């Protein structure tokens, strides 16, 4: 058994023991998401249009992550709708950012690993950078949307007479409590993943200007900053979607009584 297989087995056992049926569903969602990510890589490698593949994969991953992570329809549907809106906004933001940043492809640090390999694979690396950035933001978006949606659902259950404005403000309050921790999670995840590269920069005497203009560093920073933007946008959008859905549910309930 390989190390990855062993760790995966430990993760599955712990998720089932602690989370029960929901833990098993969450573990299964990880496997399904990995499968769809792999399928996206294969489709792009076969020269299918990158943007449609990215959009399709993103929607599927959001659906799996959200609907397999919670059973309450009010919570999951609100989080899913809000995540779709944020995803579309981020795609519209990422496309020009990646084109103007020009950090696609490989950096000078990758030259030794790529020596002897051909880079003429017939794929636009700008499109690959857009796909990578979009897919890397999905986890943060889904997590924030679910947290806010679940909190607002509980507020609605306890205070069904809440107005749209009160519900929206409650969503912003919930968002304030998760934004800080989400930012720290994203930042330290980035820093931990690139610690070896930072040590290499320091060992080779890179100047601060060289580091902040390094292609690998800039591309990763773009991913982190876009994820930050996605989390911030998720807070008001999820709150707004929840308030609209609450009104629709109230209208439907009134119509049925009549």
Image (cartoon, grey):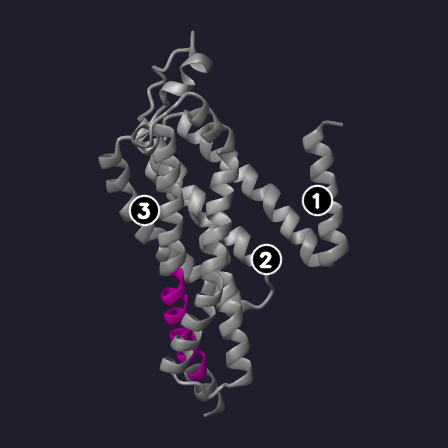
Distance in Å between CA atoms under marks 2 and 1: 16 Å
Quarter-of-image position of residue 68 = bottom right
First in sequence, mark 1 or 3: give its number.
1
Point out the frontmost of discs 1 and 3: 1
Can you tell which mark lies on residue 238? none
At 48% across and 33% down in the image, what residue appears?
Answer: 194
N-terminal of the two: label 2 or label 1?
Answer: 1
Q: Residues within 10 Å of mark 1 (few under 14, many from 20)?
A: some
Q: Which residue is mark 2?
A: 69
- Return the residue nearer the eye: 57 or 229: 229
Q: Are marks 3 and 2 in contact (CB under 8 Å)?
A: no
Task: Considering the whole magenta stretch, tell me its main secondary structure.
Answer: helix
Answer with mark 3 or mark 2, whichever residue precedes in sequence.
2
Coordinates of residue 169 in the picture (x, y in percent): 39, 77
In the rendering, which numbered label is found on residue 91? Answer: 3
Q: Residue at x 77, y 54 (%)?
A: 17
- Neighbourhood count class around disc 3 (C-alpha, 10 Å): few under 14, some 14–19, many 20 upward: some
The residue where tag 1 is placed is: 11
In the image, the segment drawn in magenta is: 234-250
Residue 53 horizontal/vertical position (percent): 39, 38
Picture quarter with the C terminus: bottom left
Give the alpha-carbon distance from disc 3 to disc 2, as whole Å.
24 Å
């Amino acid at each position: 058994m390989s190390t990855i297989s062993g760790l995966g087995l430990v993760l599955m056992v712990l998720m089932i023991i602690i989370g029960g049926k929901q833990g098993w569903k969450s573990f299964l969602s990880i496997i399904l998401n990995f499968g769809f990510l792999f399928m996206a890589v294969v489709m792009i490698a076969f020269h299918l249009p990158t943007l449609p593949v990215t959009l399709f994969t993103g929607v599927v991953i959001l659906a799996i992550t959200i609907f397999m992570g919670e059973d309450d329809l009010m919570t999951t549907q609100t989080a899913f709708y809000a995540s779709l809106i944020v995803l579309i906004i981020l795609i519209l933001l990422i496309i020009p950012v990646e084109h103007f940043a020009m950090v696609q492809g490989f950096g000078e640090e990758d030259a030794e690993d790529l020596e002897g390999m051909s880079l003429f694979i017939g794929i636009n690396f700008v499109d690959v950078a857009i796909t990578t950035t979009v897919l890397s933001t999905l986890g943060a978006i889904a997590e924030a949307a679910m947290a806010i949606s679940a909190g607002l659902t509980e507020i609605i259950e306890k205070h069904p007479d809440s107005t749209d404005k009160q519900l929206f403000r409650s969503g912003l309050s919930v968002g304030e409590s998760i934004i800080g921790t989400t930012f720290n999670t994203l930042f330290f995840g980035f820093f931990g993943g690139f610690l070896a590269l930072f040590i290499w920069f320091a060992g080779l005497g890179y100047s601060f200007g060289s580091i902040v203009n390094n292609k690998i560093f800039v591309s990763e920073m773009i991913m982190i900053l876009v994820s930050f933007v996605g989390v911030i946008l998720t807070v008001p959008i999820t709150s707004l979607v929840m308030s609209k859905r609450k009104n629709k549910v109230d209208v439907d309930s009134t119509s049925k009584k009549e």
